[in-house]
Amino acid sequence: MARKKAETQTEAKEKTRYRVKNWREYNQALVNRGSLTVWISDDISTTWAAEYRHRGRGHQPVYSDQAIEFMLTLRGLFKFPLRQTTGFVRSLFTMLKLDLQVPDYSQVCRRQAGIKMKPINASKAMKKGVDLVMDSTGLKVYGDGEWMTRKHGPSKRRTWRKLHIGIDVNSGEIVYAELTSNNEDSGDSKEAVKAMRDLISSGVKIKSFRGDGAYDTHAVYNTARINGINVIVPPREHAVTLDEKYSNAERFKISWQRDDTIRAVREKTRAAWKKESDYHKRSLVEMTFFRYKTVFGERMAARNFPNQQAEVLLRSRLLNKLNQLGKPVSVPIKT
């Protein structure tokens, strides 16, 4: 009897299998990722040198922000150290017969934190409104690998950074990326509030917000209520409504999205609520983390924090670019 019950549970939990139906287009997109013509603009010779600035103290810059960003782009794509990146670009310009000077690796490192990059949320589709999904993950700066940690335990020099990413459910593109240290108070809900405010101030309309239980805070719900955002976040284990916690809540007629979610979970089940509210679309941000670490690795190349922040923004933009080149279209396999 117990065996039959276990088999029934196994059948019920069996995941749906998918297949990619646009292999030809997706395969070509993967080929194009390695094409230098995708990453080298036609006007590179005219935008390489920095514009003349007003007279003042210090040497005038020789290279533009676009030149430094180009160097960092190739470094991120091909996982080169800065010295190898410099040699690669020099040989590339020689083959293309471009009479352009290449910045030294030390200058690229110094300029990295100060370059002005386009915002991540510059896509035209995002202006129509986004369904925001947020989560966070860790990126390693110093420390041993997984095998050494499992064998000998964690070392004292292990240093991590916390990467907060927000994506649009519809396009799959990253619309927000922020890096925080592992020493500061970098709560997920705090970054969610900052993300919503930054996106709204830049003209992006947020239709809904999804996140795991770490975002079940009053700060998130308050920001969403002010800006008319639908919050899809599971309440905590023993969550109570406002009228259960405060006797005067009903008298002031406070409308609170969290109360509606708590009642829905109580009336049905947590699993049923997740299915009806499309909460499981939150897993798309987990896929983004997988893509990020697959393409760029789980380690950070930069060593100081300002450069690491610039590195995260640049990598997020590159990931969006790879997404725009082509992505797989999957359909469930009929059994």
Image (tube, rainbow, N blue to C red):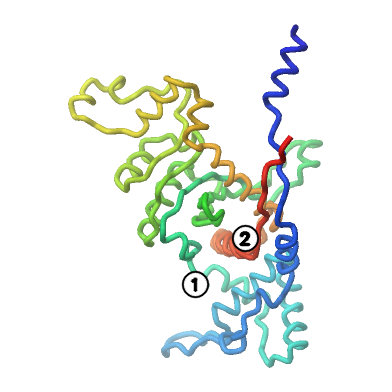
Q: Check the picture and name the quadrant holding the C terminus.
A: top right
Percent x, y of residue 289: 63, 49
In screen coordinates, is 113 left or right of 28? left
Quarter of the image holding residue 46?
bottom right
Q: Which residue bears the numbered disc 1?
A: 116
Local secondary structure at mark 2: helix
Above or below — where is 153 with respect to 90?
A: above
Viewer-proximal residue among 79 and 255: 255
**Label disc, if present, on residue 7 of the rendered structure:** none
Q: Which residue bears the numbered disc 2?
A: 323
**Category of crowding for the residue at label 1, using alpha-carbon neighbours closer than 10 angstroms: few (below 14), some (14–19), many (at least 20):** few
Q: Residue at x 22, y 24 (%)?
A: 250
Visible residue check, residue 71: yes
Q: Residue at x 61, y 65 (%)?
A: 321
In screen coordinates, is 84 left or right of 330? right
Percent x, y of residue 25: 71, 62
**Category of crowding for the residue at label 2, using alpha-carbon neighbours closer than 10 angstroms: few (below 14), some (14–19), many (at least 20):** some
Local secondary structure at mark 1: loop
Percent x, y of residue 261: 40, 29
Percent x, y of residue 207: 40, 48
In screen coordinates, is 92 left or right of 41? right
Q: Amino acid at mark 2?
A: Asn
Instruction: Determine the residue located farthest toward the front in the rendered image.
Output: 334
Viewer-proximal residue among 85 and 302: 85
Q: Residue at x 50, y 63 (%)?
A: 120
- Give the mark, 1 or 2, whose residue is nearer the N terminus: 1
In screen coordinates, is 239 left or right of 7? left
Label total for image: 2
Q: CA distance from mark 1 to mark 2?
A: 23 Å
Instruction: Determine the residue located farthest toward the left in the rendered image.
Output: 251
Q: Amino acid at mark 1?
A: Lys
Q: Residue at x 69, y 36 (%)?
A: 16
